[in-house]
Each structure stands twice: as structure tokens, then as C-alpha cells.
Amino acid sequence: MRHGKRFNHLSRTSAHRKAMLANMASSLIIHKRIKTTVAKAKALRTYIEPLITKSKTDSTHSRRVVFSYLNDKDAVTELFREISVKVADRPGGYTRIIKIGARMGDNAEMALIELVDYNENLLDAKAKGPKKTRRRRGGKKQEEGAEVAEQAVETAEEAVEDASEEEKEGAAAETTEEVKEEAEAEEVKIEEVKEEPKEEVKEEPKAEEVKIEEVKEEEVKPTSAEATVDKEAVAEVKEEPEEEEKPASDEAPEDEEKKDKKE
């Protein structure tokens, strides 16, 4: 009979049920989210939320009470150091149950149970929130006035954008002109640098040529004394072969006479 059944026994004995809920509570504190059946998630919510409220007063007594339920030192440390600080401003409702459908094997209803303050996606969505719109009574006139004001604002923004674009174009043109002037100045400098070496190169060879011509003239134009000495030497050289050739002419008839005798 089920008389006086105030909570779900989950088809377990008292000791088995307490041990299971203690393990699930420790896992939820450490991992911040667990997957289980809907019945177990509802039983866990009534088991862990009083412990989270107890952790807001960090004292030796409250730690010992929580440890008697969890029997896990790491979970107790995490609860009192991290979670209690994050949920300090929340007056209850620390967990959330999200149903995710039926299980494949026995078709049991499954759910996710998580700590509310650790779901960053939902917190960001709430922080942004939808845009609030205000509606005023006043009929069509106010709506028309609002439309005219919006059009005026749009035209003003367009004018500002056009002015900014014109300023940008003017600044760009000025910069291009400055760049062109700088480029022309650099080209003029480069041309001057190119012209200077050419003139120097042309002038230096002329001076060297003049020096070479002077040296050649000195070599070609000997002094008058040297010229007379050279002429005398040339005359002696010419006279010597003539004297030597005479004996050769005398010997020639003697040879001819010897030949005639032998014959």
C-alpha cells in the first residue's frame, strides 16, 4: 500500500536511495551538468538545493552538515569555494531541468539537470535580451511626425557621409599631388647625379691625351746633336758592306779560271 508516500522512493531502499542521490549531487557540483531520468532529476533537485543554501554560510558546522550528505571532500570544497560565491545573490532555484526526450532502451523520459549560473549561453542571451519598444497614444499625427523626424535624421546622416567622402577625396588628391611632386624632385636629383660623372669622365681623358701627345713628341723629336750622331752611324753602316763586297768580287774570277783549267 502507498499510504503516506510523500516522496518518490525510486524503487530503492532508503540506504540505496541516499547513496545514489549523494553520488549524483557530487557529480552535479563538480561537472555543473549531468544527464539522468526526469524522476531522478526531480528527486536530486530537492536533495541538493538545501545543501547549496547551506553553503552560503561558510562555517565549520555548515561544512560538516554538507559533508554528512555528500561524503565527498572535493565536492564540499568546490561547493563552498566556487558555487556558493556565484549563487550568493540568488534566493533559491539553483538548478534547472531540461527534458531531452525518451531513452532508446526502455523509453524512459530523459533530462539534463544543471546549475543555473553556469549555463553561459542562456546568461549571454538574457544579458542581450530583446529590444524594448515603446508605444504612445496620439494617433496618426505623432506617427507622421516620427516618420518625418526619421527622414530628417537620415538625410542629415547622408549629408554628413557625403561631406566626409568629399573630404577624403580631397585629402587623397592632395596626397597624390604631393607624392608626384616628391617623385619629380627625386627624378631631377637623379638626372643631376647622372650628368655630373659624364662631364668628369670626358674632361679627364682629354688631360691624359695631352700628356701622352707631349710624351710622344718628346720621343719623336730628338735633339739636333742626337740627329747628327744618328746620321753618321747610318753612313758608317752603309760604307762597311761595300768594303766587304769587293773581295767577294775578286774571288769570283779566280774560281772561274780554276774551272776553265779543269775542263
Image: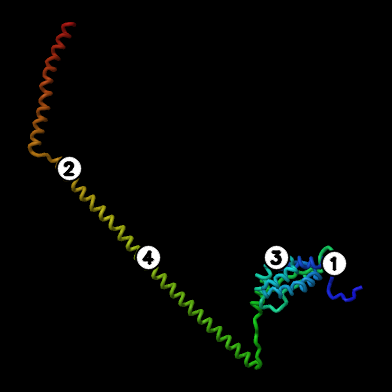
Of helix, strand and loop, which one carries label 3? helix
Q: Nearer the viewer, mark 1 or mark 2?
A: 1
**Spatial separation of the CA atoms under disc 3 and disc 1:** 25 Å
**Spatial separation of the CA atoms under disc 1 and disc 4:** 94 Å
Residue in the picture at 15% in, 11% down: 255
Circle 2: residue type? Lys
Q: Nearer the viewer, mark 4 or mark 3?
A: 3
- Decide which of tag 3 and tag 1 comes sooner along the chain: 1
Give coordinates of residue 157: x percent, y percent: 53, 82
- Residue that mark 4 sits on: 183
Report which quarter residue 108 is drawn in: bottom right
Of helix, strand and loop, which one carries label 4? helix
- Other-residue count near label 2 (Cα within 10 Å), few / some / many at <14 / 14–19 / ≥20: few
Residue in the picture at 81% in, 69% down: 109
- Residue that mark 3 sits on: 73
Give coordinates of residue 178: x percent, y percent: 39, 70
Circle 1: residue type? Thr
Please name whichever residue, 95 or 153, is drawn nearer the observer in this view of the structure. Answer: 95
Whether residue 1 is situated above or below residue 186 in the rendered picture: below
Q: Quadrant of the C terminus?
A: top left
- Decide which of tag 1 and tag 4 comes sooner along the chain: 1
- Residue at the far top in the pictured view: 262
- Decide which of tag 4 and tag 3 comes sooner along the chain: 3
**Spatial separation of the CA atoms under disc 1 and disc 2:** 133 Å
- Residue at the far right in the pictured view: 1
Of helix, strand and loop, which one carries label 2? helix
Mark sitting on residue 13: 1
**Spatial separation of the CA atoms under disc 4 and disc 3:** 77 Å
- Other-residue count near label 3 (Cα within 10 Å), few / some / many at <14 / 14–19 / ≥20: few
**Spatial separation of the CA atoms under disc 2 and disc 4:** 51 Å
- Decide which of tag 2 and tag 4 comes sooner along the chain: 4
Mark sitting on residue 216: 2
